[in-house]
Image: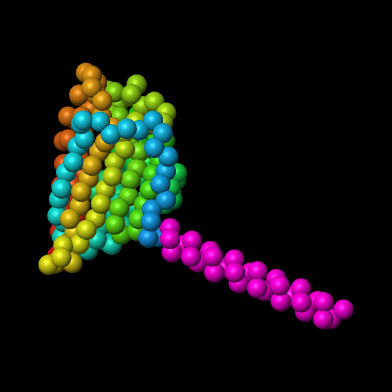
Amino acid sequence: MSRQNNKIKMKVTVTISLFLFVLNLVGIAADSQPIRFTMEGKKKTDRSIVLNFVVDAASDEVFKLWTTVEGTKKFFGADAVITPRPGGAYEIYFLPRTEPRSDINSTKGAKLMWMKKGRELAFEWTMPPFASELNRKPLPTWVEVSFQSLANNPGKTHICVAHHGFKRGAKWDKAYEFFVRGWASILYRLDRLCSGMTSK
C-alpha cells in the first residue's frame, strides 16, 4: 500500500513540476511577444496621427508613467483606471473633481489592447464630447505608443505616439484636428515632467 502511495506521490510531483515548467515557458513567451486584444471594429485608414518625441528619461521609467495610475496622473489626466493586461481597463479621467468617473470627459470603457513591458502598449481611445456619437462599440480608434532608448544615450527615450482609425466626415475631421493638438500637448507635459525628473 505504501509503495502505491509513493508512486502516486511521485506522479503528482512530476505533473506539478511539468506544469510549472510549461507555465514558466508561457510566461517567457508572453513577455517577449505581446498578447493582442481583438481588433474587431478597428481598421487603419488613410488618416493617422503620428508624433515622434525624445524625452530625457530612461525607457523603463517612461513606460511606467504610461502604464500606472500614479504615472498617468503626473502628465496625462487627473485620474485613471488601469488594469495592465490585454482587455483590461485603460481609462483616463480628465475632470474627476467636478465629474468623477464621467462618461463625457474621459475615455471610460476603453481597453488596453496589448503591452510589451518597457517597449510598447496600445489602448482604445474615445472621441471628445462634441463627437461622442462616434463612440460606438467596439471603439473605432486606438493609440499605439512605442518606447526606444537612444543608442548613444540610454538615459533618453524616443517615443512614437500613433492614433489610428480616423474616418472622414465633419465630426471626424474636427476630432482629428482636436487630437493633433491634444497629443502634442500631452507629449509636451510628459517632456516637462521627464526633464524635471532628471534635474533632481
Q: Give the vertical position of 184 relative to 138 (above or below).
A: below
Residue 196 in sight? no
Q: Nearer the viewer, residue 5 or 190?
A: 5
Which residue in the rendered view is the most extreme toward the right? 1
Residue at image location 54% in from the left, 69% down from the top: 21
Q: Position of residue 156 (x, y in %)?
A: 16, 62
14 horizontally vs 37: left or right: right
145 horizontally vs 53: left or right: right
Q: Give the vertical position of 138 relative to 191 (above or below).
A: above
For the C terminus, the quadrant is bottom left
Q: Which residues are magenta?
A: 1-30
134 horizontally vs 19: left or right: left
Residue at image location 48% in from the left, 65% down from the top: 25
Q: Which quadrant of the view contains residue 153? A: bottom left
Predominant secondary structure in magenta?
A: helix
Which residue in the rendered view is the most extreme toward the bottom? 3
Q: Which quadrant of the view contains residue 77? A: top left
Q: Position of residue 34 (x, y in %)?
A: 38, 53
Tell me, what colour scheme is on the image?
rainbow
Q: Position of residue 3 (x, y in %)?
A: 82, 81
Q: Position of residue 103 (x, y in %)?
A: 39, 31
Q: Give the vertical position of 80 relative to 40 (above or below).
A: below
Q: Nearer the viewer, residue 183 or 77?
A: 183
125 horizontally vs 2: left or right: left
Which residue in the rendered view is the most extreme toward the top? 170
Q: Is residue 75 magenta?
A: no
Q: How many numbered marks does the figure carry?
A: 0
For the N terminus, the quadrant is bottom right
Residue at image location 16% in from the left, 35% down from the top: 181
Residue at image location 21% in from the left, 30% down from the top: 46
